[in-house]
Image: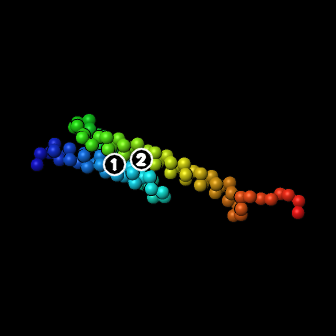
Amino acid sequence: MNPDAMIKIRMLKGSLRCFAFGVLGLIPLIGLPFAFAALWISGRVRAKEKLYWNAARPYRIWGVIIAAAGTLFWFLIVVLIAYNAINHGSGGSACYYHGDV
């Protein structure tokens, strides 16, 4: 088979894989690795786009946008959980009553 055709096929499949992993990156708790994988795959596909036209380019772009949004969202959630654990890590309730008994 033509080597250029094989490169184009791999590029198309990579773009679709980037989109799928980007969508999976929105899944709670386990989505962060999928979002990172989508961003990494996008970089590899983008390098090939400099030489060849990519018919699935919109899928790659949307995959990157969704993966970046998922990464930021889950990163903020992890930071908020860590912040809450550090500030209220006494093991008790976060609400205290300081009135007269």
Which amino acid lies under the numbered mark 1 shown in the image of this protein? Answer: Cys
78 relative position to 25: left or right: right
| Residue 95 visible in image | yes
Q: Secondary structure at mark 1?
A: helix
Comparing 89 with 23, the one in front is 23
Q: Secondary structure at mark 2?
A: helix
Residue drawn at x 36%, y 52% is 21
Residue drawn at x 40%, y 54% is 24
Q: Which mark is residue 67?
A: 2
Residue position for label 1: 18
Query: Of the residues under marks 2 and 1, which one precedes in the sequence?
Result: 1
Q: Quadrant of the C terminus?
A: bottom right
Q: Which mark is residue 47?
A: none
Q: Are marks 2 and 1 in contact (CB under 8 Å)?
A: yes
Residue drawn at x 55%, y 53% is 78
Q: Is residue 46 above or below residue 18?
A: above
